[in-house]
Image: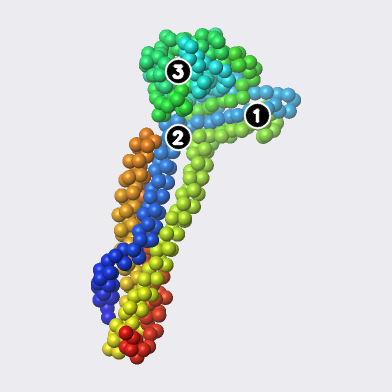
């Protein structure tokens, strides 16, 4: 019996018991679809993360100072500005960042969830923030400690009906004039990057009574000079403090790599869990093939009596098991594409995020190959049992 004849007999056997065959394939279908959706979700999350980080700027470098070094030394703003001037080939700009832990008010309403940060006039360029109305902070604002501020789109839309420029916001009881508003950068929600106020770092340090600045945001000249710029900053801080424990320097690219690595680990674990369904499906195929061998014992006896050899019988049942699992894999691929499309729509509607769940061709081929391989693997035992049947005993079977 040729391969094509065995394949046609396998298709005929599957079609003769459609319901039983479909239930047998169910584990394979679920496993393949689950693997596709999980891998597609991982790819979508990775693309979304990369796009988000790129919009923020992958050339960003942050420096956090924890304490004083040997000789009671501290880092000053002038030290960091001078560092940028001395390294124009790697570092482009720097801005101190001072978090003001105080209340802000618009009229009689408290802005309890609003973040207030003191920054320099270059922070909008460093952070890739776009001004929608008015202007950003200027050097003269920082130098003269002016009571001016720039607000995020949430504050502008919620409290000033989109006309925030010229309005007043009180910060720790002091009136600040809004000189600019920012374009929406996230989802415009209350708890996000659009609910923020930027003021000159000089006045921020004064009203928060912070004599020393401990956070600095740098921008490298390009994405290619991030590592070199990071090394320059670390070397400078090491010379100032004499200890690596007094500071921490990290880049946006480094954060992206770490998150990407964590995401890959999580997706691998979830994919492994989903792949268990493929094993369960394989067990189901083995079970149904054992039943099939019992039901077709007389048929096997007749074929052996007519001259069929063990390898012919074995090949027939292995092909049948492999065909069953392969068809299940194809149905799983179709289901995986359908579920991926549904997941994309649910994310867009439920979370308001434009993130696509798109399975990769590699994940599809691997899932299908594993499903077909599992069918052959788990079909081996029933096929071996069928091939070893004694033809005389088989013919006597009712």
Cα separation, mark 3 vs mark 1, equals 29 Å
Q: Secondary structure at mark 3?
A: strand
Identify which residue, 194 or 150, lies in the foreground: 194
**Residue 197 drawn at (x, y percent):** 49, 19
**Residue 228 drawn at (x, y percent):** 54, 35
The answer to whether any part of residue 228 appears in the image is no
Identify the residue at the far bottom of this view.
392
> Dividing the picture into quarters, in which one does residue 44 lie?
top left
The residue at the point 27 percent across, 89 percent down is 306
Mark carried by residue 151 = 3
Callout 1 crowding tier (Cα within 10 Å): few <14, some 14–19, many ≥20: few
Instruction: Kindly identify which residue carries mark 2.
Output: 53
Q: Left or right of 61: which side holds 336?
A: left
Instruction: Kindly identify which residue carries mark 1.
Output: 66
- The quadrant of the picture occupied by the C terminus is bottom left
- Is there a contact, CB below 8 Å, between mark 2 and mark 3? no
Q: Earlier in the sequence, mark 3 or mark 1?
A: 1
**Residue 113 drawn at (x, y percent):** 50, 23
């Amino acid at each position: 019996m040729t391969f094509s004849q065995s394949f046609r007999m396998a298709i005929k056997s599957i079609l003769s018991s459609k319901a039983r065959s479909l239930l047998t394939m169910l584990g394979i279908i679920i496993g393949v679809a689950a693997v596709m959706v999980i891998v597609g979700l991982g790819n979508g999350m990775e693309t979304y993360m990369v796009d988000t980080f790129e919009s923020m700027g992958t050339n960003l470098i942050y420096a956090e100072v924890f304490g004083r070094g040997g000789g009671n030394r501290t880092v000053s703003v002038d030290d960091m500005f001078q560092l940028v001037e001395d390294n124009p080939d790697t570092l482009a700009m720097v801005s101190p960042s001072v978090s003001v832990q105080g209340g802000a008010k618009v009229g009689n309403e408290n802005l309890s969830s609003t973040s207030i940060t003191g920054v320099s006039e270059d922070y909008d360029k460093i952070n890739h923030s776009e001004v929608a109305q008015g202007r950003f902070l200027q050097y003269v604002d920082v130098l003269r400690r002016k009571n001016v501020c720039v607000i995020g789109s949430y504050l502008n839309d919620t409290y000033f009906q989109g006309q925030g420029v010229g309005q007043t916001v009180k910060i720790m009881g002091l009136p600040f004039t809004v000189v600019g508003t920012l374009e929406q950068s996230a989802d415009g929600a209350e708890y996000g990057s659009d609910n923020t106020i930027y003021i000159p770092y000089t006045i921020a340090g004064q009203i928060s009574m912070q004599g020393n600045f401990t956070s600095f945001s740098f921008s490298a000249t390009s994405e290619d000079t991030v590592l070199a710029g990071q090394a320059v900053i670390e070397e400078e801080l090491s010379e100032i403090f004499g200890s690596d424990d007094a500071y921490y320097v990290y880049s946006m690219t480094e954060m992206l790599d770490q998150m990407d690595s964590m995401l890959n680990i999580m997706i691998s674990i979830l994919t492994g869990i989903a792949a268990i369904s493929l094993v369960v499906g394989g067990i189901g195929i083995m079970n149904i093939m054992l039943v099939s061998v019992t039901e077709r014992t007389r048929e096997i006896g007749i074929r052996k009596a007519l001259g069929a050899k063990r390898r012919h019988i074995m090949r027939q049942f292995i092909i049948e098991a492999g065909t069953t699992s392969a068809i299940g894999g194809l149905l799983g691929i179709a289901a995986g594409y359908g579920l991926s499309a549904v997941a994309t729509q649910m994310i867009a509607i439920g979370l308001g995020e434009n993130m696509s769940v798109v399975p990769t061709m590699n994940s599809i081929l691997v899932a299908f190959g594993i499903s077909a391989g599992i069918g052959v693997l788990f079909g081996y035992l029933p096929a071996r049992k069928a091939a070893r049947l004694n033809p005389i005993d088989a013919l006597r079977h009712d």
